[in-house]
Image (cartoon, rainbow, N blue to C red):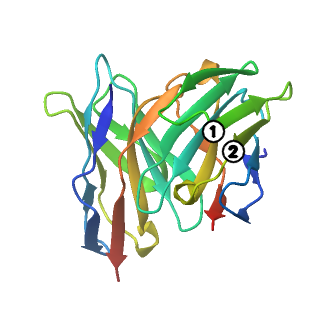
Amino acid sequence: DAGVTQSPTHLIKTRGQQVTLRCSPKSGHDTVSWYQQALGQGPQFIFQYYEEEERQRGNFPDRFSGHQFPNYSSELNVNALLLGDSALYLCASSSPLDTGYGYTFGSGTRLTVV
Amino acid sequence: AQSVAQPEDQVNVAEGNPLTVKCTYSVSGNPYLFWYVQYPNRGLQFLLKYITGDNLVKGSYGFEAEFNKSQTSFHLKKPSALVSDSALYFCAVGNAGKSTFGDGTTLTVKP
């Protein structure tokens, strides 16, 4: 049973550039959440997608946007990259049928902005 | 608003000794509480959850957590620590809709 798959695992971008991160949820899960984990901190909620719509959003600027596809996979887009966007970006999948169960996390994408 | 506090950045224990990693929370209504573990350069792995019912929750790898409503705490425990338990542990409050995580506690188990 495949878990959550994220790509790429690492990437380096220059300030001002745009980046797209990808996530395939665990089989049977239809909800995808994105988190940003800065060094030495806990994950911070960016947003969640369900039924191809953004359902909840954390305190992140509009430079952060996303998309969910009919097969439940998701993309996270970040525009006009800042040095402070350097972090581990985690994708987590879940299912409304398992409310309160918790997430299944991917291994993350390490983004470095230089 | 919901929040989580992990008051200890680091916990050190000897192998075979019991361990406790502390967590307190703040949330309106009934809490959904979770513990996750993170190994270097990896995502988080679910350990256990409290939704309702017994205050002592048993999870993966021999870990358990005690929910205390009056103290708004959800401490992670293990009766006998292993060196392989050394990792970063996160407490979280919420549900699969949106979870708020603490800043983590690094557990080091020494042989």
Give the amino acid at mark 2. Answer: Asn
Please tell me whether mark 1 sits on a helix, a strand or a loop. Answer: loop
Is residue B93 positioned above or below A89 on the image?
A: above
Q: Is residue A26 found left or right of A94 in the rendered image?
A: right
- The residue sitting at the bottom extreme is B111
Residue A101 in sight here: yes
Task: Please state the horizontal and vertical placement of residue A86, each as a whole percent of the image.
Answer: 57, 59
- Residue in the picture at 53% in, 28% down: B96
Task: Please state the horizontal and vertical placement of residue A101, each as a whole percent of the image.
Answer: 52, 30
Chain ID at mark 1:
A
Q: Is residue B78 found left or right of B46 in the rendered image?
A: left
Count the numbered circles shown: 2
**Which residue, given by chain and number where applicable, does mark 2 sit on?**
A79
Is residue A16 positioned above or below A114 on the image?
A: above
In the picture, the quarter occupied by the C terminus of chain B is: bottom left
Residue A26 in sight here: no
**Which residue, given by chain and number where applicable, does mark 1 sit on?**
A63
Please tell me whether mark 2 sits on a helix, a strand or a loop. Answer: loop
User: Would you call the spot at circle 1 few (<14 residues within 10 Å), some (14-19), or many (20 or more)?
Assistant: few
Q: Which of B37 and A48 is in front in this view?
A: A48
Q: Quadrant of residue B5?
A: top left
Task: Please state the horizontal and vertical placement of residue B10, each as a whole percent of the image.
Answer: 28, 66
Is residue B100 positioned above or below B81 on the image?
A: above
Give the amino acid at mark 1. Answer: Arg
The earlier-in-sequence mark between 2 and 1 is 1
Q: Is residue A98 found left or right of B61 in the rendered image?
A: right
Q: Nearer the viewer, residue A91 or A84?
A: A84
In the picture, the quarter occupied by the N terminus of chain B is: top left
| 2 and 1 marks in contact (CB < 8 Å) | yes
- Residue in the picture at 54% in, 22% down: A99
